[in-house]
Amino acid sequence: MDVLVQNIPQTDVIFLEELARRMGWTFQTKENVLRNYINTRPKQVDLSDAEIMDEVYAVRYSK
């Protein structure tokens, strides 16, 4: 399956949703994709704030 990004006018969203449903395609807005991603992330992570910042600094200043 391919993932496509399409910019369409807001007025045509209902049409596209109906077309996707009839064709058996899935249709998600970028907000839905982001919300689903966030909802699947772990809520408790075994990292301290200092460890996270160490990684941020390592990536940011390793250039």
Image: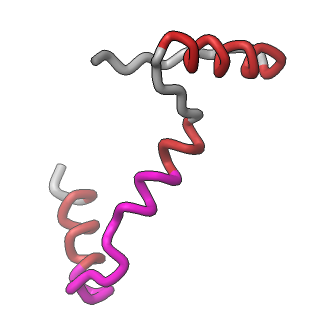
Q: Return the residue found at the far right.
A: 11
Image: magenta residue range? 35-51
The residue under the point 29% across, 77% down is 53
Left or right: 28 with respect to 10?
left
Q: Is residue 19 above or below residue 31?
A: above
Along the viewing direction, whichever of 47 and 54 lies nearer the viewer: 47
Q: Is residue 49 above or below residue 56?
A: below
Q: How many marks?
A: 0
How far across and how far down the image is residue 9, in percent?
76, 15
Left or right: 43 with respect to 8?
left
The residue under the point 53% across, 27% down is 27
Left or right: 32 with respect to 4?
right
How far across and how far down the image is residue 33, in percent?
48, 42
- Quadrant of residue 49 in the image? bottom left
Magenta stretch contains residue 3: no
How far across and how far down the image is residue 36, in percent?
46, 52
- Quadrant of residue 28 in the image? top right
- Quadrant of residue 52 in the image? bottom left
Magenta stretch contains residue 39: yes
Along the viewing direction, whichever of 47 and 56 lies nearer the viewer: 47
The residue under the point 31% across, 72% down is 42
